[in-house]
Amino acid sequence: MKIVSTRLPQRDLISLLLVSPCLHHTLVSYPPLWLVLDFHEMSNAGDRLVAALSLERYRQVKQINLEFAQDIEDKHLEVLKNKLGRPMKMKYEGDMIPLTCPNVDGKRTLLKCLNCLQNLEYLNLNGCQKISDKGIETITMACPALKVFSIYWNIRVTDVGVAHLVKNCKHIVDLNMSGCKLRPNGPTNFDFQRSEFTCIKITDKGLQQILLNCSSLRSLNLYALSSFTDVAYKMISLLPNLRFLDLCGAQNLSDQGLSCIAKCKNLASLNLTWCVCVTDKGVIAIAEGCTSLEFLSLFGIIGVTDKCLEALSRSCSNTMTTLDVNGCVGVKLFGEDCMLQFLGCVRVADEGAIAVAPGADESQ
């Protein structure tokens, strides 16, 4: 039997295992089929995760998606460390792995789980509200090869969790630690702390740890994290490979901080929506420093004017495809005719949302 596709949905793939012993053996013996575990929006996700990682076929798993999964808690991640018994080290396939083993069965299960996670590169914990710093410590200790980590919409992770992440995972290139805003007037399924309106409790210190220790970052998503200041924002300049940066809602970001970010020469996408302290000075610095910029959102910034558009036209007109100036009351060049003289051939997507088409025929 020949495997003709590795793109079957996980549910269908599991169903095929039940068709016949022959098919079961063929599928299980083909590792590329078992590189992804997808439990997003599923119930009992924690138990499903533990059960799956104990199976031989998931020994090389590279991606785990638990986005908005239900019933995933620290305790499910802590099974990797196993609280019972005394700490010890065992040699497993050439590596010394610290673990705690109360009995033979527990030892085998733990070793299988740890071996699986040694190859994990992608982990999505978005919306997993019951995961805390303790869970982050546990899972990152087991995933030294992690490259993509996302924990959007979490109310329990703090600077402590960030410290564990940067200590244990040295190869992060894509990080999403975006926060969220509570809706105090509406119902919610989560146990939010009543006094807090920004969910992720990460300070300048936490962001600085990321910027100092994750120099290979290419994508950094800090959407709706309004508590940071220029003390941390200036250090984004330490990321030479950064291409995607989302700072939507960065209320404390000033022109000085943005001027430091302009040192990220490879930046292609920058979201400055509702960065209310930014003015032309900061955007001009970005235009002059980030000449490969393709996407820029200035949505809601009243401190920018046509002056920054002139700078963008001089430096970025050959690369930029989207410029959003909705709500920028100081920008007057909303019309297509006015924009042609600055950014070449454009089409106006919405009022103030300008899509630039580099290289297009201006006569069209």
Image (cartoon, rainbow, N blue to C red):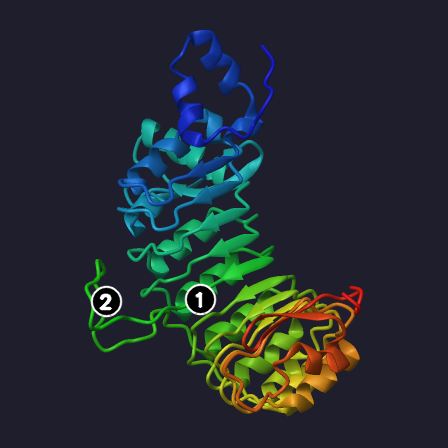
Q: Quadrant of the N terminus?
A: top right
Which amino acid, by three-letter code, is at mark 2?
Answer: Phe
Q: In terms of depth relative to the viewer, which is nearer, 184 or 167?
A: 184
Q: Is residue 225 left or right of residue 119?
A: left
For the question of whether residue 234 can be seen, the reply is yes
Answer above or below: position of 68 versus 275: above
Q: Residue at x 57, y 91 (%)?
A: 330
Where residue 60 appears, as percent x and y from the top left, is 53, 33
Q: Name the image quarter holding residue 332.
A: bottom right
Q: How many marks?
A: 2
Q: Residue at x 41, y 63 (%)?
A: 161
Above or below for 346 versus 176: below
Q: CA distance from mark 2 to mark 1?
A: 16 Å
Q: Amino acid at mark 1?
A: Ser
Q: Local crowd at mark 2 within 10 Å, few (<14), some, or many (≥20)? A: some
Density class for disc 1 (Cα within 10 Å; few <14, some 14-19, many ≥20) is many
Considering the numbered disc 1 on the image, is that residue within a helix, a strand or a loop?
Answer: loop
For residue 154, which quarter of the picture? bottom left
Q: Is residue 101 visible?
A: no
Secondary structure under tag 2 reads loop
Instruction: Indicate the position of residue 62 as horizontal and vertical percent values.
Output: 53, 40
239 or 180: which is nearer to us? 180
Q: Indicate left or right for 148 with 19 as reference.
A: right
Which residue position is annotated with label 2? 192
Q: Residue at x 66, y 74 (%)?
A: 238
Quadrant, the C terminus: bottom right
- Which residue is denoted by mark 1 in the rendering? 178
Which residue sits at x=45%, y=51%?
A: 124
